[in-house]
Image (tube, coloured by chain):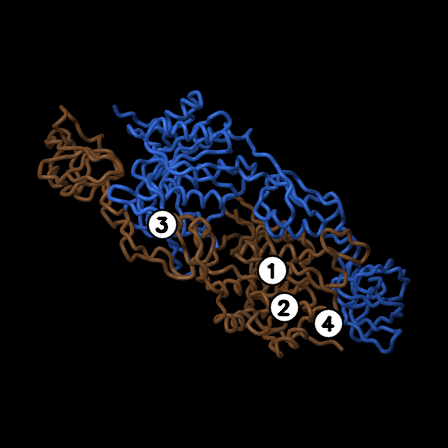
Chain colours: A blue, B brown
Amino acid sequence: MMEYFNCISLKEAERLILNELAGLIVGSEQVSLVDSLGRIAAGDVVSKEDLPPFSRSTVDGFAVRGMDSFGAGEGVPALFDIVGEVVMGEQTFIQLKPGQAVTIPTGGMLPIGADAVVMIEHVERPDKDNLLVLKAVAPGENVVLKGEDISIGRQLLSQGRKIFPQDIGALAACGCVVVPVRQKPEVVIISTGDEVVDIECTPVSGQIRDINSYALAAMLEDNGCIVRRYGIVKDQYEELLAALSQAVLCCNMVIVSGGSSVGVRDHTVRVIKELGKSNVLFHGVAVKPGKPTIFGMVGKVPVFGLPGHPVAAMTVFGQIVKPAIQILLGQAIRDIYTIPARLSRSMASVPGRDDFIRVQLIKKSNEYWAEPVLGKSGLISTMSAADGIVHIPADKGGLYSEEMVQVELITKQ
Amino acid sequence: MMEYFNCISLKEAERLILNELAGLIVGSEQVSLVDSLGRIAAGDVVSKEDLPPFSRSTVDGFAVRGMDSFGAGEGVPALFDIVGEVVMGEQTFIQLKPGQAVTIPTGGMLPIGADAVVMIEHVERPDKDNLLVLKAVAPGENVVLKGEDISIGRQLLSQGRKIFPQDIGALAACGCVVVPVRQKPEVVIISTGDEVVDIECTPVSGQIRDINSYALAAMLEDNGCIVRRYGIVKDQYEELLAALSQAVLCCNMVIVSGGSSVGVRDHTVRVIKELGKSNVLFHGVAVKPGKPTIFGMVGKVPVFGLPGHPVAAMTVFGQIVKPAIQILLGQAIRDIYTIPARLSRSMASVPGRDDFIRVQLIKKSNEYWAEPVLGKSGLISTMSAADGIVHIPADKGGLYSEEMVQVELITKQ
């Protein structure tokens, strides 16, 4: 008895996932600043300090009142009295009066009364106490005022932001030595298939290595998860039931690789139904590759059934599982920046289905061409040869040769 | 006595760095496949096996000789004898004769004599032993032949390639459980400055926190390095000499943050000259921000002196130090994929200088606009607010409003 898929659209799949997972954001933890790179901020972080904490010079020169220099030029220098020197890293107590100047290094603290700095290149110093300014400076010129960079209360991190090196710079500047971040989601990968053997084994005839546990684990790590590879489970209902019922006890998500289709050895849907009290949200998505994709909930744990086919599994991971992880992480939705390119050949698709084509990017006379990677669609070599993926949306029947397309990179440097 | 920079162009700086570092690629090590993500391949890896190791079906159905089905259609079925069944994960010893068919599951091993599989949707089975095929299949249809995906000797990884999840998939498929990768370069960061205090401290007047050690460490980790923060060294020749002479003993690169200009407290150049026997390759690069940048060699260890200014330090890191790290890693040069955008305002530059402008990307009616982040150029808030960087090359005097520019992302998801 063949069952058939009751395919839903990719959009509908995304809606169902968001609906189930929006309330299941993982907990937060405090990590030290040096461990926060790439993590997701679990709350807004605002500065409790002004940066800089004092008005500073941005050049080597002489601190003055800018207005005292007005009108000064090469032929008509303005004369100042040098009344002291700012020492780097030390507080200054000098109070500048009109017509006075103070020697100041880059980064030095501006004396009270000063509001600008004349660069050393624009002065002459006839003697120790006198200064000729050859170029006027406006108030605020060559200085950064207290709090001008980051003022008290300014947001350093917004909840859901992925933390980049420049954020770490801003946090360091303001003395944020611990950062609230989302815990890393723990994801169990269960591989299924009577023919599947671990990668350490040499397959005998009829067997094939467990590619997906490793490729999916790498994608999960890339997306900020902790991965537990459960190993390989035979195509037997009871074995998968036992494995999945164990897995859901101790993780935030389960990925079952293989057994997601509608054959006699495809147990994933039945196991989720048994454990999750029928909570299979979808089985079958109108995407290519990746149609036999399952999403269900076992209690509060999302379970994805992915095709055993590595290319389909990796494609579905990128398009469906990765956004689900971002929901669990409370990650702010950002644009996926894509590379515009010209398609090198026409690609047929089927209206109502989202297709994902693997392409190489080739630069020709200042523009990129997206060259579909040839070979039967399932070959893993087509995935590793590709630079990115072109999406043929469901409302299109295909793409024309030389049409401009957007390439989502799978090879970020 | 003011020294002045003898600025060289960014291109010339890159040439000098390549010249010094090309022979200094770090050593290699073997890591297990699961630890190879993001590492740089230290050699070509070729497959010692065929993938798949046997000809397989890609669908559930019946293995046949394709030519026996020729002419079959809905009205004119072709009749086959069912002579057996392929069991998943097991070798089959059936030898198919003309007019015979064998039940086969997706992934099942093709029997000798068969060259195609009829999908289960395209057959009728009047009884246990007979099969009516309603749609012809061509030889090769619905099968992947032995070695068709990856054949023996095919390159899985090329030397210098960064390892992506899809590469891990291909390596797993072929049983490559250890991978030769470049060792992670060890990089020491020395922060200098009398005014600089650790981020754990509350700065008193005139002091400022050590932003660069943390921001640069994050960038180094992002680029596959092991980082040792040496801490903060006062602006004193002997202290820096002691720190640098220690550092070069045990690392592949040193970054000295601050003290890279030409003031009385800028000791980096003199210290490199002392330790490196005058081997300062350049001091001053015609870039903005980042002019006071130093590159020297102490023995076989490259030393970069970066501006103390965090934005300048991060910009120079991205444009000069990161490519240097890629040389040490023997990393294959890939295009830096950029996002095309329309500049929202004119930006002046100076011919002969490479400018790097921080921008936000804003989507308006299906195209991106690059909006320069306002504020004085040195503010760290301008860096953390930016999505990417626009390069104004040395042969341009600026960019016009609404001109198309290429944005290098500093916020990759």
Image quarter in which the N terminus of chain B is found: bottom right
- Residue, disc 2: B293
Residues behind callouts 4 and 3 on a single chain: yes
x then y, percent, for residue A397? 33, 39
The crowding category of the residue bearing disc 3, from other C-alpha atoms within 10 Å (few below 14, some 14 to 19, many at least 20), is many
Residue at the spot 81% in from the left edge and 54% down from the top edge:
B204
Distance from Cα at disc 3 to Cα at disc 2: 42 Å
x then y, percent, for residue A152? 75, 45
- Give B409 or B239, whichever is nearer the viewer: B239
- Residue, disc 4: B238
Residue B30 visible from this viewpoint: yes
Q: Secondary structure at mark 2?
A: loop
Q: Tell me the subunit letter for badge 4.
A: B
- Give A303 or A156, whichever is nearer the viewer: A303
x then y, percent, for residue B280? 61, 75
Q: Is residue A267 left or right of residue A65?
A: left
Q: Tell me the subunit letter for badge 2.
A: B
- The tag earlier along the polypeptide, 3 or 2, is 3
Residue A352 visible from this viewpoint: no
- The tag earlier along the polypeptide, 2 or 1, is 2
